[in-house]
Amino acid sequence: MIRHAFAAAALFAAAPLAAQSTTQEQLDTRYDRALAAGYKALFLCSAIANAERNGAVRTPESVAQWELAGIQAPLDELVGDMPYQITRDGDGELANVSVAWADDMRPRMAVHNSKMGCSQLPIEGVPVPIVTKRPALATGHAPVVAPRGALAGSFSQAFGEAYGAGTRTTAVLAMRDGALLGEAYAADFGPAVPQRTWSVAKSIAATLVGTAVQRGEADVAKPAGLGLFVNDRRKQITVDNLLRMASGRYSDTPGNRTDPLYFGGSTVEETALHWPLVHLPGTVFRYANNDTLAAVKAIGASLEDHPPAEFFSRLGMHDTVAETDWRGDYILSSQVWSTARDLAKLGQLYLDEGVLGDGTRILPEGWVEYASAPSGPQPDGAFGYGAGFWLLNKSEGVPADTFAAMGNRGQFIVIVPSLNVVIVRRGEDPTGSRFDIAAFTRDVIENMTN
């Protein structure tokens, strides 16, 4: 009788648990909704707040048309119908954006800090008061410089599909010898409207590593601080290995997918640093957000004293913001918001060999050659890879020394040292579309002289 009583009790105790169980498919569907809501909250927050920071305006309808259209499946089918709420503080500044995704859970939320942009809270996270306020920014921006002659034709073609079916260009810009030759923008954009750089941020991260090296606060040849114990081979991974996408670490998806961090509200530390080795460091190329994030973490102490905002200010990139996770770690593999003009200034720094206009050197001598040298294992495909930059060394008709920062949805800074040229293209290209940056670069270079 006692045995039967225990069995009955166990059966009744198990019943609620059985009722609450879920299949993997149901779990994945629920998680996809959480990611989609996080994606929508963060992009509404960042696009609107960072534009307003620069004295420009973005509307939710504009963000839906551009940043939230053509995104990765299955999020693309979910974001449109998810209700959102934009909350502003007493001064009218955007405070947070929340997006509902499940009846039994809190909305996903992105919170805005006027000094640091927007960050995404973890699932079920609640905001804490933000007391810091940025000083008012000067919002004056020089008028748009229209391209002339044949260059205008190349720019016009960039806004169609001449360089890729389905592509959607938002901005193009060309600069030679430090002078702006021309720029053009889609209707919802302009010189003051920032966009997410996506993986162009990796080149910014590599540049910040260079500034730390110049200050004597980092050494790319030294271990990056990964690994747990003395017998952990990850301790041999150097900062150089990380910048060249050659850490040898495993990741569970192609390396440019870090959904838990980008849309799920996880942190840099819990997402990017724990992966085990599957190859010896320095032997295999695998493009990975995790490697860039680990490189930035390796110079974390330097960034505390010299944050990205200081670097942007010194370059005159006043319309650029490096955003963080909810614990304050920079997501410098992707989450930077910047304008075409500001990105051109980064390219010009490399043309100027890391020296500012006042003669101050902020990158080490030889850093440009270091960043653009294919000295590590190389990727398959149309482009080579340096240290945080892609190389157009396989592209016919493009000068052999051309290198570039490249990002998702068609973000490009093309740097041509031999011609003293910088070309910027911004876009919101749908998943599956690809802008032919090599062909555009060839045409722009040819038409600069016509």
Image (tube, rainbow, N blue to C red):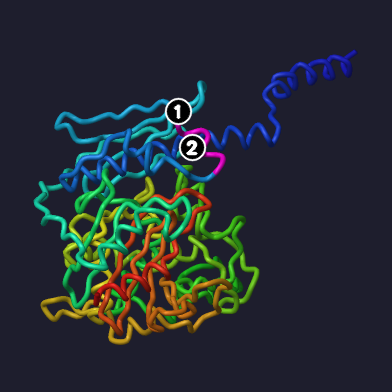
- List x then y, in percent, for residue 70: 47, 44
Q: Residues within 10 Å of mark 2 (few under 14, many from 20)?
A: many
Image quarter of the C terminus: bottom left
* Above or below: residue 433 compared with residue 360: above
In the displayed structure image, the side of residue 46 where residue 135 appears, left or right? left
Residue that numbered label 2 is attached to: 36
* Above or below: residue 50 compared with residue 244: above
Looking at the rendered structure, the secondary structure element under dot 1 is loop
Residue located at (62% from left, 56% from top): 252
Do the residues under discs 2 and 1 have CB atoms within 8 angstroms?
A: yes
Image quarter of the N terminus: top right
- Secondary structure mainly formed by the magenta segment: helix
* Above or below: residue 264 compared with residue 101: below
In the displayed structure image, the side of residue 200 where residue 241 appears, left or right? right
Looking at the rendered structure, the secondary structure element under dot 2 is helix
Q: Residues within 10 Å of mark 1 (few under 14, many from 20)?
A: some
Residue located at (35% from left, 64% from top): 300
* Magenta segment: 73-81
Q: Earlier in the sequence, mark 2 or mark 1?
A: 2
- List x then y, in percent, for residue 14: 75, 22
Number of numbered discs visible in the structure rendering: 2
